[in-house]
Amino acid sequence: MEKKVLDRMRAMCSRREYCRSDIFRKAADALDGDKTAAERIADILVKEKYVDDLRYASAFARDKSSIAGWGPVKIRHMLSAKGVPREVISAALEGIDDARASSRLEKLLENKYRTLKDDPQCRLKMLRFALGRGYEYDEVSSAVDRLMRR
């Protein structure tokens, strides 16, 4: 049974990136909660380079930043929730282009502003929106102020 699960996990990992905790959880589920065997499977997959937390975190950060428009705070939080170590998260976040992230924030705020420009609480709602997307308060505040002055 363990060999069958290991082969299935290898096949999964060859199709897309997974972090170690995801593989451990999937293996444990497939083995009816046998955490010792799931740990062995996760160790084997890490040793064989099917699973690499840095590779996973970098791909996750790149995708969420460029496609979903998430900021570094939200990306850091989501990777932490998946059990990725802090050093790995920091290394992955260094791969995000700050200039592109800033322009993406500006674009998100411009689109939001169009829907809120007649609202008396426009600034507050825009701040809350951008903070929910995972951007730093100082960056959001200055971007909102620049947009409101135009």
Image (cartoon, rainbow, N blue to C red):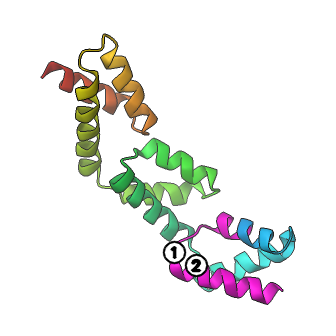
> In percent of the image, x 37 and y 22: which residue is there?
125
Mark 1 secondary-structure assignment: loop
Q: CA distance from mark 1 to mark 2?
A: 5 Å
Would you say 94 lies left or right of 56 here?
left
Using the image as rendered, state which of residue 113 and residue 74 is in the foreground. Answer: 113
Q: Amino acid at mark 1?
A: Arg
Q: Is residue 145 left or right of residue 41?
A: left
Residue 97 x %, y %: 29, 55
Tell me which corner region of the image, top left, top right, bottom left or bottom right, holds residue 83: bottom right
Name the dominant secondary structure of the magenta segment.
helix
Which mark is drawn over residue 142? none
Q: Are marks 1 and 2 in contact (CB under 8 Å)?
A: yes
The relative height of residue 123 versus residue 139 in the rendered view (above or below) is above
Say which quarter of the image contains residue 12. bottom right
- The answer to whether residue 17 is magenta is yes
Residue 18 in the figure: left or right of residue 44: left
How packed mark 1 is, by other alpha carbons closer than 10 Å (few <14, some 14-19, many 20 or more), is: few
Q: Which residue range is magenta in the image? A: 1-24
Q: Is residue 80 above or below residue 150?
A: below
Q: What type is the residue that disc 2 sits on?
A: Cys
State how many labels appear. 2
Q: Is residue 12 magenta?
A: yes
Q: Which residue is mark 1?
A: 16
The relative height of residue 71 versus residue 36 in the rendered view (above or below) is above
Q: Residue at x 78, y 79 (%)?
A: 40
Is 4 above or below relative to 71? Answer: below
**Residue at the image point whose x is 31% and y is 10% from the top:** 120
Percent position (x, y) of residue 148?
Answer: 20, 20
Q: Determine which residue is flagged by label 2.
A: 13
